[in-house]
Every structure is written in C-alpha cells, then in structure tokens.
Image (spheres, coloured by chain):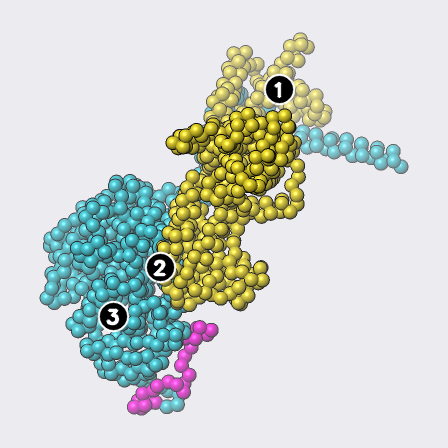
Amino acid sequence: MRQLQSLLVFLAAILTFARASSDYHEQLVLRPLQPSLLLASFNFQSNTTWASFEQQNFRYFPRSLGQILQHANTRELHLRFSLGQWDAENWGARPWKGAREGGTGVELWAWVEAETDEEADGRWLTLTNALSGLFCASLNFIDSTRTTRPVLSFQPSGYHTNSTASKLHLLHGTLPREVVCTENLTPFLKLLPCKGKAGISSLLDGHKLFDASWQSMSLDVTPICRSGSEDCQLQITQTTDMVLDIQRSKRPRDNPIPRPIPSEELKCDTSKPYNSFDTCYPLDISAQEEEWSLSQIFGHTMKGSCPLAENESYPVCINVPHARDIYTSGAREHKDESGYMRCFELTPQEDFEMILPPQDLSERAPLEQPLLYAERSFIGYGQERGGVQAILTNPSPTDAVDFVYMESLPWFMKLYLHTLKAKINGNSEDVIQEMYYRPALDRKRGTQLEVRILIPANSTVVLTYDFEKAILRYTEYPPDANRGFDIAPAVITIGNVSIRTTSLLLPLPTPDFSMPYNVIILTSTIMALAFGSIFNLLVRRFVAADEAEKWDVRALRLIIKGAISRFARRFMKKTTKKD
Amino acid sequence: MPAETQLSAAQDPTVKDQGNHVAPANAVDVASARKEPPPERPESIRLRYLVLSSFWAIIIFLGLPIWWKTTSIYRAPLPMDEMMDWADGRACRPVFPLRISIEADSLQDHEAQNLLRTTQHALDDLNDFSAHHLRLQLSPPANASSNANELSTTAADEELALTIRLLKGDSIQADLQKYSPILDIYYTPNQIPTSSSSSSSLATFIANTLRQIFAEEQAMIAYLLSTSSAPPERSPKALAPNVAESLAKWTTRSMKYSRTYHLTFSLFTPTATPSSWDIEAALEDHMKPLLQSFSAISNFTIDTQVQLYATPGVSGNILKKEDLSGFINAAEWPLSPSIGGAPTINFIVYVGDMEVEGGGKSWLIPQWGGVVIQSDVSDLRPAMLTFSNQLMSLLGAPESGSLPLRLMTLVRVRSASLLLKASGTLGSLARLTIALPSISIPRSVADGVYTTIEHLRKTCDGLGGQGGLENARIAEEAAEKAFFEKSMVGQVYFPDEHKVAVYLPLLGPIGVPLVMGVLKEVKAWKTRRRTSKQS
C-alpha cells in the first residue's frame, strides 16, 4: 500500500511540477475496484503564460473561460459537478485525495480580487452568471443565501503575489439540488484542445459517464509561478472521475435490459451432489478477474492520442498487478517497479483498444485506506425540529487526525449552536479545537459553521446538533416542494485531503398551494357574515311575528300564472291574425 | 332572538295596500289576516337614512379611493406629442452642412473670391438634395509656414470636411491625398476665371470633382432618410434602383453602432495542425494602425484563439454560394460573443484548401464577421488585409474615397442613422404606451425619454461632427434603455375572470344588502310621497 501511495504521490508531483513548463498534458488512469467496478480518472492540464492571458491571445486555454475570469477579476477558480456517492469502505481512498471532487450537485469556489466585500459580491455574481451560461448549469442560483466565505477550510492552491493576496476574497457556493447531466459535459469537453475528437477525451461519452455509480467533473484554474521569478503561468486542470459498473457497461446499448445467463453458459459447481442438467449451484467466481475491454466499457475504442500532448508522458495507465494479462492494439507497455502500475505509449493516429481477458488471480492491487470515514444523516422527527448527526471515524490504529468540518446550511434550517455536541467513542470529551460560526439571517444568508476537531487514533466522533425548520413564504417553495430541500454536503478538510459527505434531503412543512384562494373565500365569508348581521341590525325594524309581512308563495305562483296566460293570449292573438 | 319576533322589511302599511292592488282577489284574505305594525316614528326613519348613507359614504369616500390607489398602475407622464414629432421627422430636419475650404495662395484675392463664387454656384446647380449641402469657404492665406500648426487647430474646430489646394500645373487634374483630407487641384493659368464671367471650366471641374467625391455619402444619407418615416417632401428624389439595392445591402451588412467593438480572431483547423500562429505580430503590423485611425469613432478590444479539430458545417472542396451561410458550425465552434456588452466581430482563418464557387477564398458574413480560407498560416498578411476590408464594410464605411474621407463620412452617416433609430424608438415607445393601457411606466422610462429628446436636439443642431455622433449615441442608448425597461417588458397580467374570482366573495355578500337597502328606502320614500299627495 505504501508503494502505491508513493507512486500516486510521484504521479501527482509529475502532474503539478514537471508539467509547469509544458503546454498540454492528458492522462487516463484506470483502477479496478471491488466488486466488478472500474474507476477511470481522466486528467487534462494545460498552461498559458500570464502575458498572453492578459492580452487575450488564447491557444490551449479556452477563450470563453478566460474572458469570464478577466471580466470577473477571478484569480483562482474551482468548479465541481458531482453525482453519486463514493463508497469509501469498499473503494478505499478517493482519487486525487478528494481534491478534485465536489459535493453532490454543483460546487464552486473562487478567489476574487476586489477592494471591498461588496465589490467582491458583485464580481461573484458576474462570475456565477457567466459560468451558468457557459456550463448550462443553474449556477446563477448561487445567490447570497447559498454563498459563504469559508475561513478555516479552503486555502488557495495557486501562487498569488502579496499585493493581490491581500485583496483576494474567497467565496464558496453550492447547489446540491442540481442534477449533473450531458448538457454539462458537452461544454466541459469543448474547453479541451482536442475536444473529444482525439486522445483520451474521445472516450468520454455522456451515456456512460452519467450511468456511472459515482462521477465527478472538476475544473480548476490556478496561477502558478516559479519561486522567485516573474515568469507566471495560468494553469487549467480538468478532471473527470467515474466509477463504472463493468457488468452494466457491457450490456449492449440497443438492448440494455439485464437478462439471465443462458443455461449453457452458467458456470456450475459440479462437485455438488445435486448438480445436473437442470440444477446448478453457481461457482464462486469472485476470485476470478472480470473480463472487459475499453470499447465495452466506454462504448468505443480510443481515437489515437491527442497530438498536442507531450510524448514523454503516457496517456493511458492501469493500476493492476503485473501478473494480469493485458492485450493492446500495438501500444508499447511500460511497467513500473512498484508492481502494480503500467502505462501505455500509443501510436498517434491509430485507434487504441485494450482487452483484459478473464483470469484467475490471487493478487490484487492494494487499496489505499482513507484517512477518515464520514457519514451524516438527519435525526429527530416532526415538522418543527430536527437534528443532524455526523459520524466521523478515524481508522488508523496509530495516527490522530486533525481536520476541519464545514457545514453551510440554508437559512430556513435554523441551527441551535448550544446543542452542538461532540462525543468520542460514546463519551463526552472536548475534541473541538476551534470553531467559526456565522449565524444565518432570514432570506439573506445561510449558516456557516466550521469546526476544527482532533480525533485520536482508532476512535469515532459523533457530532450532533439540533435545528428548527422555518416556515417559508408561499412563493419561496420550489415547484416540487414535497420532495424536500437538498442540504449541501459537509466538507471535511484534512490538510490537502478533502472528503465530502452526501447531501441530505430536508422535508419542510409544505402548505396546500390552493391556500390563497381558500383564504380569500373564507375571510370574505366571515366578513360578509359580520357585515350582514351588523348592517341588518342597524337598518331593519323589529316587529311582532304576526305584524310581519309574510312571504306568500301562493301569490307568487298566481303572479307567474297570470303572466304566462297573458303571454299565451298575446301569442295566440298573433297566430290568429296571421291565419 | 325570540321566535315570535321576526325581522321584517315592511315598514309602511301602504306597501301592503299596493301589493293587494296587484295581486289577484283570492290572495287578499291571507294578507288581511296580518296585524298592522304600529307606524314608524320619523326619527327612526331618519336614523335609518343616516346609517345607510354613512355606509355608502364610507364605501365611496374611503373604500373606492383605497381600492383605486392600491390597484392602479403607475404611469409616468410622457411627452407623447414630442415623441411622435421625433418619430415622424417633424422635430428635426437633418441637414449636413459640409465646409470645404479652398486654399488658393497662388491666386489673387479677388480671383479667389470669384472662383469661390462660381464654384459654389456650379455646386448648387448640381445639387438637388437640400439635406446634404457643400459650402465652400476661402481659407485665410497661410502667409507663414510657422502659422500652419495654429491654422490647423482652428480649422479642426470648425470641422472642415475637405481642404482644396489649388496648385499650378500643366494640365487640369484632381488628386485626392491618401492619408489626409486634402484635394489637390492642378490648373493651368488660363483657366482662372475672370471677374466678369459667371462660369469657368476650373469652377465646373472643381464642382464636378467634389460632387463625385461626395456622391456615395449623399446616396447613403438619402437612402437612410428615405427608409425612415420622414415626411416624403423632405426625402430626395428616388434613388436609382441599382444604387438603392447596393445601399440596402450596405445597411444589412453593417453592425449596429457602438462605442466599443470586440474583435475575435480565430484560427480553426480540421486536424491537430497547425496549433499555433503568429497572430500577435500580424495584428500589430496590419490591424492596429487601422484601428488607431478609428479611435475617434469606436474603440476596439481584441482577443485571439486557436481551435483544433473543427469541422465546418458544410463539406466538399468547392463551396457553393448558399453553403457559405452554413459554413460556420455554430453548434460546435466556440464563437460565443464576448462578455462585457460590446458587440463582437468575428474573423476566422480556416485552414484548408476549399474554394468558393467561382474563385475566391474569403467572404463576409453580414453583421457578424468575415472568413478567410488559407492552407498555410505562416504568412498572415493577405488574411489581415482581407479582414481590414471586411472590418471597414462591417462598420458601415463607404467603399470609395481616401481613408480620412471615408471615416468622416462614417461619422456623419452613423450620426444620421442613430438619430433616425432613436427617433423611431421614441415613436415605438409612444405607440406602445397608447396601445397597452395596463402597462406600467416607471419614472426611469420618462427620464430616459427626456434624456433622449435632449440629446436628439443637440445631435440635430450639430449633425456632421464628432459631437453629433456622441450625442446621437447617448440618445440612442437612452431610447433603447427606456424601451426595453425590465418592469415594462414583464407586464402584469391580471385577467378579468381572475379579478372577479377574487372580488366576488367579498363584494357579493356585502354589496347585496347595501344595494337592497337603498332600493327599499327609495321605494318606501316613493310610496310615502304618493300617500302624502293623496292625503
């Protein structure tokens, strides 16, 4: 495991530092996960010099994004689109140490240069609106109630000169309700120099990406400078990570309904006494490696390599033991000494296919253990109050973990800070080191809570707090109000590693939406009733019952009869005249 | 309330009598079984009157005004007549007085005066369009070259359209200088008009040359006026069909005027090569000087991009005329307009060896930009020259004449078109206000209208100069802003059924007793009057 970790660190180091001088780089790392899953991590990185960015001469850096950044005075930008849940117990640590991952839905944070907070808010608004148009996402709904200014959790990853750093404002916004889909992938691909026409980006396909068990798209723009020199560059990094179900991906697209395996293809345990042509006990095949190929998983083969990418890096790598058989279409294989990683050097202009046959293999590439397991859920009951419980487990038997837990809650979830309790292994102990709390203002801003916690080795901290549900105004409910309100994931930061919990769905008391008309009718009726009685009391005269004018039904009947007969007579006269 | 007592509306015994009158005879016995209530006292009748009238008074003097106040829509007063005057061209008569100065140092003063008079006469004879008027003047004699700088500054104040320099030469000929608004006229000494003659060949020659130089501008302005809603007697005689056609093309081609334009230069290639181009140097050498000369009219910002793997919207090596509009693959090529409000002009170099049917490798897309197809991007000079031409026509500059003259013409034509456009917008706003009585008109719209009118007036007074253009731009902007006011566009829609549904539950139960009370009182009053007359 240590080997793998060192390898990943080495790869990350290559990506961040060695590439700083070059222009464009792309790499796909494949990692089989248990059971029958495949993690595919795409990474695209390009640089532009600060001078040509200022002059708006764009080459690999996308023009549309560059103009937005300049217009909104944004110095560093991080945008995330995520879907699904990472199963840390089975899949191990997150790819890129969670740094290229966001909470469910859309997450955006940026360092905006501005003199005052108001100016920063204005530029943030410009930024969210422009990005909303660029990525076809509802980013323009990140208003002041969804924006926070984290204090402990986020640090700029790029280099900022001291003069700009003092004017930088960090703004963070989330849209947990946003459903990430193909319309977000298309603009994402358009930002790449090879545009999904060549290289590893040709494997990205909306049908497969959004069918994944977990997926995350990220876009980071950071300024990087060599220390001590004025030679600065702007780096754009785009990543896409997805966990694909191999069985599910292998289903043909025109016939995606899962069907039982035909009886002749069943692998039966013949040692069972009842085994016969119509009785089968399936063999345990979990020891066997799954059979798959690139074209089965992604729908088609890879269309050569992107000619802009440098030659010294290998575009496709796979994290499997060296003993695993892999057949490729004429690519040169480079195995590294750790024993679990090999990369392929492609011939440009030629389609690349990789086939992994079924194989019995005792050895598996080791999983990296996450630093922390985190889960969060609602507790409590009723329409008025509720509670949140976050269970944070440190699996390491030796090392304590110091981390920052950040919650940004909507204003209608009114947090009671005095109920915030942290229990360690069931005992109340003071594990909260530091806290930053910014209370909500109704309809203006949400609650921001950042807590620094130290978990000793091999312990579990349960963090709980209570809240009250606010009653919203009639127009503040979304169209499907009974679905509930999405609460943004909590962000856990451990140094440069970050973990996000899942988002929560908060049911709020919802009114009957035909209410306004009912209210009008009801109040009108009551007012009319009151008015009618008072008016009649004032205007009418009280007399004895036998003095009252009686409503005579017979008289009315006679009047009607008389009228009818008069009318009939006139009609008859007319007809006789005609005759 | 005890069961025996009952609310009764019958206050007066005479009501019953009347009822008996109408009812058939057999109904009488039922009514006659009734006991008469004691007659009412006059003060109780008076009290009832007072109660009823105070209810009505509250409704009329308090309820109705509150209802009116809370449901009425704010409509700021607009100067409708003035707006319509502008729209119909009654408020302003666009006149473009062009000052042309004659520098005739080689001539005697009286000779020069004479020449000026005859030339002006010849010009007036030739001109049939009163809005566009060339006026000649003698420039003060430049007796010292050191004075030249001073002279040029005073001349700039008066905004001379052209300076004519009379020079002695071997034969009569005109030479328009390329980079300054100066026309050199060479003449032979015997062509100087004598003081007695009313015409001379030199004067006619100058007049014809001037007319030729300003013919395109005149046609442009005439076309603009003829397409606007100006009164017919003001627009000039009909333009020749072919001229009108080319001018119609010119209007569809040119971009809307703006103080700033954004230029995007893009390199599109169908493969991965070439992935870079030497655009910075090319822009510096071939584009920047031109943009510099435009600085009085518009500013420009520039960005460039390289896009690989870009397939055009049409296939094939020979592009047909009808394919050209589909060549730009709008769905895939990232050519979104720049943010910041300024209109974007796109210039595209496409790497390929395609050709337009009938030869040619470049074309202009009206109000959008230009395309050049080039197989090799090592030399960008031809592409940049094509783009310069395309930029000139996209900005609406005339096609003939020297650069300074074209730019000056552009200023005048742009002011005229902005003036007409702003006036037209004012008219539309006025008509909209009349047509939709339920639309609200906020204060800002009225302010915008007044700003527009103020600046239109200034424009009208100073047409033809730089200030006129600036005023026209402000006027046009204010007019557009007023017309597209957000709160006006989203008009409140309250259908009548909706109002009835909301009001009826309240008005029904309250209105019925009130109205019935009045009717009853009126009836009672009538019968009382009748009985008092009878008695």
Q: Which residues are magenta?
A: A248-275
Tell me, by letter, which chain the rendering colours yellow.
B
Q: Which residue is mark 2?
A: A59
- Identify the hue of chain A: cyan
In the picture, measured across the screen, residue B29 lies left or right of residue A65, that is: right
- Seen in the picture, residue A173 relative to B35 is either above or below; the reply is below
Query: Residue at position x 49%, y 38% from top?
Result: B182
Say whether mark 1 and mark 3 are on the same chain: no
Q: Secondary structure at mark 3?
A: helix
The crowd level at tag 2 (other Cα within 10 Å; few <14, some 14-19, many 20+) is many
A53 is within the stretch colored magenta: no
Residue B136 in percent (x, y) is at 54, 30
Dominant secondary structure (helix, strand or loop) of the stretch shown in magenta: loop
- Seen in the picture, residue A58 relative to B198 is either above or below; the reply is below
Query: Residue at position x 46%, y 39% from top?
Result: B486
Q: Secondary structure at mark 1?
A: helix
